Image (cartoon, rainbow, N blue to C red):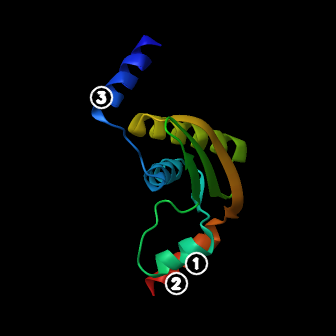
């Protein structure tokens, strides 16, 4: 508790730090895709349009609410076929929480996982072939 009080005093004398929601979204998205078993993030229409325009959207499939000291995250993921979904979801929750807390100093109060689909290896290979041509 004393350490936290000292930190608050320093912040008061120097000014405040505000981390943009998009920064937290990017951190969460990258941390989620690091986990084995994630086929991708489900971004919906807006994310698809941004990618078509050549803009890589690292916050795709991520919704965050950032307060002064806390953050809540919702992740919309697509898992690879054959993985155990609860194990992958727990690994994603832990990695996202660790990444956000380490990089921003915010306390992550919740990481909600929404499984939006399953990625099949054959489908992924066909999509890659179409992109190459």
- Residue 109 in view (yes/no): yes
- Where residue 126 is drawn, which disc sits there? 1
> What's the distance in space between the residues labelled 3 and 1, CA to CA?
58 Å
- Give the image location of residue 52, x and y in percent: 48, 81
> x, y (%) of residue 125?
56, 73
Where 120 falls versus 46 (above or below)? above
Secondary structure type for disc 2: helix
Q: Residue furthest bottom?
A: 133
- Give x and y (percent) for residue 19: 41, 46
- Identify the image quadrant of residue 42: bottom right
Near mark 2 (Cα within 10 A), the count class, few <14, some 14-19 or many ≥20, is: few
Compared across the picture, whether 60 is left or right of 120 comes to left
What's the distance in space between the residues labelled 1 and 2, CA to CA?
6 Å
Q: Residue at point 48% right, 75% down?
A: 51
Disc marking residue 20: none
Residue drawn 67% across the image and 48% down it: 113
Q: CA distance from mark 3 to mark 2?
A: 57 Å
Residue receiving disc 2 = 130
Image location (x, y in percent) of residue 78: 64, 59
Q: Earlier in the sequence, mark 3 or mark 1?
A: 3
Is any part of residue 84 visible from this angle? no
């Amino acid at each position: 508790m004393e350490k936290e009080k000292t930190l608050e005093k320093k912040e008061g004398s120097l000014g405040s730090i505000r981390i943009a929601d998009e920064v937290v979204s990017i951190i969460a998205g990258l941390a989620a895709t690091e986990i084995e078993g994630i086929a991708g993030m489900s971004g919906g229409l807006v994310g698809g349009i941004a990618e078509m325009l050549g803009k890589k959207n690292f916050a795709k499939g991520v919704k965050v609410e950032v307060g002064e000291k806390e953050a809540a995250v919702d992740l919309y993921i697509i898992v690879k076929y054959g993985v155990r979904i609860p194990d992958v979801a727990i690994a994603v929750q832990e990695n996202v929480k660790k990444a956000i807390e380490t990089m921003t100093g915010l306390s992550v109060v919740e990481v909600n996982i929404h499984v939006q689909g399953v990625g099949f290896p054959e489908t992924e290979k066909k999509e890659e072939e179409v992109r190459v041509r």
